[in-house]
Amino acid sequence: MKSICVYCGSADGSHPDFLAAARQMGLFLARSGLNLVYGGGCTGLMGALADGALEAGGQVIGVITESMNTPALAHPGLTRLEVVPLIHQRKARMYELADGFIALPGGYGTLDELFETLTWAQIGLHTKPVGLLNVKGYYDPLLAMLDRAVQEKFLFPEHRRALACADTPEKLLEQMQNHHYPAEAVRRWMREA
């Protein structure tokens, strides 16, 4: 992996640990020699993430929509900021630039990006690793819901296991580097086997 796309909130969240974790993720990616791809924002977790990576000398590529490319929202100090017309193009461009994906805490946008990326893997459009940084147990309810989806046979166990999850950047990146794409499950899902 050379580039990691990180999805996260543009808000600070309710606890300083969320901002600290975003900054730590940025620092860790840069110190690991990985480029950061993200949504280009300067606020909330997005800003802390980018600031951490830049502070450690990392390469940071932001992809932002025209409507969000304002002085109040766009990060002014990135290695590169790409501006695209629509959110769909933003997600597609971030996907193109990344070799793996991580979701930090966030809201609708973060969850949308995470689940679209997981869905693309599920139907065989990519084999890239996807992970959650589970800060303060933020994703525990979501993980329980995914386990329920497996239990109720709406999700294959292999697809559930393919989603890496850890509470530190180090553990998460280690899991992602050992990612095993569930090709057989994808074929079953697509009714090819």
Image (tube, rainbow, N blue to C red):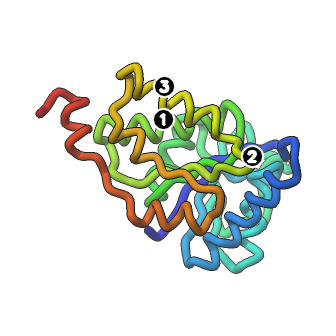
Q: Quadrant of the C terminus?
A: top left
Q: Secondary structure at mark 3?
A: helix
Q: Secondary structure at mark 1?
A: helix
Q: Residue placed at 55% from the left, 61% from the top?
A: 172
Badge 1: few (under 14), some or many (20 or more) residues near its Cα, within 10 Å?
A: few
Q: Amino acid at mark 3?
A: Arg
- Judging by the rendered image, the residue that carries numbered circle 3 is 148
Query: Horizontal placement of 192 versus 163: left or right?
Result: left
Q: Amino acid at mark 2?
A: Asn
Badge 2: few (under 14), some or many (20 or more) residues near its Cα, within 10 Å?
A: some
- Judging by the rendered image, the residue that carries numbered circle 1 is 116
Closest to the observer, 12 or 188: 188
Q: Is residue 60 visible?
A: yes
Closest to the observer, 59 or 18: 18
Across and down, in percent, residue 56 comes to 72, 78
Query: Horizontal placement of 86 versus 77: left or right?
Result: left
Q: Amino acid at mark 1?
A: Glu
Q: CA distance from mark 3 to mark 2?
A: 39 Å
Q: Residue placed at 56% from the left, 78% from the top?
A: 33
- Judging by the rendered image, the residue that carries numbered circle 2 is 69
Q: Residue furthest left?
A: 193
Q: Residue placed at 53% from the left, 35% from the top?
A: 88
